[in-house]
Image: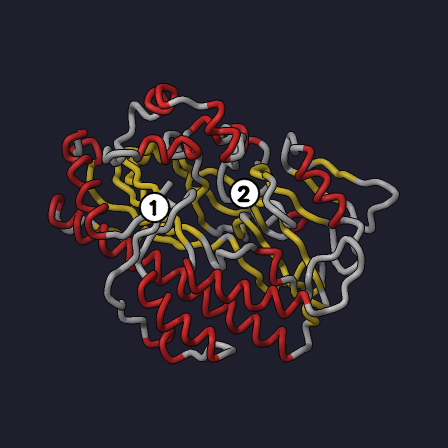
Amino acid sequence: MNVISDPQQKIPIYSWADRIDPLSLQRLKTLARWDRLAGPIAVMPDIHFSGDVCIGTVLVTEDCVLPTAIGEDLGCGMCSQCFDFDARALDRDALRRLVAEIMKDVPVGRRVHSTPQALSDVLRESALSTGALAHQRDWLGSRHLGTLGGGNHFIELQRDTLNRLWVTVHSGSRGIGAAIASHHARAAMSHDAAEHALPFIGSHSSESNAFLADLHWALIFAAENRKRMLEQVVAILTRHIGNAITSDFFDVPHNVITRETHGGRTLFVHRKGAMPAAPGMRGIIPGSMGTASYIVEGLGNNASYGSCSHGAGRAYSRTEARKRISIKDFRRQMRHVVYPDSSGVETALIEEAPAAYKNIKEVLEQQTDLVKPVLRLEPLAVIKGG
């Protein structure tokens, strides 16, 4: 861990990244001048620039919450399921058939369900804070539930070091999460704020209660969204390999605010693109669509507020990736992994090419005091919205 500090900062920056790009470093130092943060900023090895708060950043507060500090995809995270099945039995033709079936059953990218999906009882019966959000729940939520979305969201079939098959789903709260985030960001922006500040809401206010309740709903929706997609994939796999599902399953969000005790103080921990890593807690840190992922166990490091990276992190922005990486490069990097071969997919996925991401081994080496790798997962097939 490196400590970054200067006379203008009110708090230090604790960094587990061996290098921070200039834009991200500038933004981190700006945040460190603000007097509403209640402790050092923790920077994960997958740090990369993204608006007011970089992906891979953990912020803590004591008397306020920061709606914009966790991005718009509230509750975005990953779930992973293991199968008692020898993944070596799936050749490339079998993997191509599985990918085609998943693409048929799970809406990807801009696709959504054409007919409303039934929300679970808890999602349907839990009130949102405004009538407008309730309307968005009934309209957007019912059509986005069980859909992957685009960007870096993915469904991946993987093989672990014991040759068992795994499925990992990475997605979040989709359009309804973005609607909730935007509503509360506007509410927070109505407050007077000092220079360098993020929009904030006092923690003892009715606005704070409303935001945290809506955030909790979005977390449930995001987890249910991943579960619906996983159920679709499990049903497809069962037709091909039989009922081989095991009890080895976990689901962990990485865009979230939680109330936790650190150093004897109760704090609001804001994680944006950072995964909770409490002692013994399991999660998955993916590399890229063409490189290994790792199941890890948290070590509960207090300096990081019990957090770790949520992935490898981008080495190039999407714009840079399109300039630097050719279709030929992409195909070479993906030669061992099956992916959809429909028209235009490769062009759309250039910005998600393996070379656009940091080296996952190096990212893990930078956080040996945050997590312990448990299993290496090699990608067999991947579906990504691009």
Q: Disc 1 to disc 2, how far (Cα)?
A: 17 Å
The spot of residue 23 in percent (x, y) is 67, 37
* Residue ranking furthest to the right: 7
Q: Amino acid at mark 2?
A: Ser
Give me the residue at 57% from left, 51% from top: 272
Residue 206 position by quadrant: bottom right
Q: Amino acid at mark 1?
A: Thr
Please determine whether, in this image, residue 309 is positioned above or below residue 18: below
Which quadrant of the figure contains the C terminus? top left
Which quadrant of the figure contains the N terminus? top right
Residue 8 position by quadrant: top right
Residue beneath disc 2: 309
Nearest to the observer: residue 82 or residue 177: 177
Residue beneath disc 1: 168
Please determine whether, in this image, residue 86 is positioned above or below residue 71: above
Q: Are marks 1 and 2 in contact (CB under 8 Å)?
A: no
Nearest to the observer: residue 152 or residue 238: 152
Q: Is residue 52 visible?
A: yes
| Rendered image: mark on residue 60 | none
The spot of residue 53 in percent (x, y) is 63, 49
In what element is the residue under mark 2?
Answer: strand
Labels 1 and 2: the sequence-earlier one:
1
Give me the residue at 41% from left, 60% from top: 222
In what element is the residue under mark 1?
Answer: strand
Please determine whether, in this image, residue 240 is positioned above or below residue 329: below
- Using residue 96 as the reference point, say whether residue 361 is left or right of it: right
Give me the residue at 76% from left, 49% from top: 32
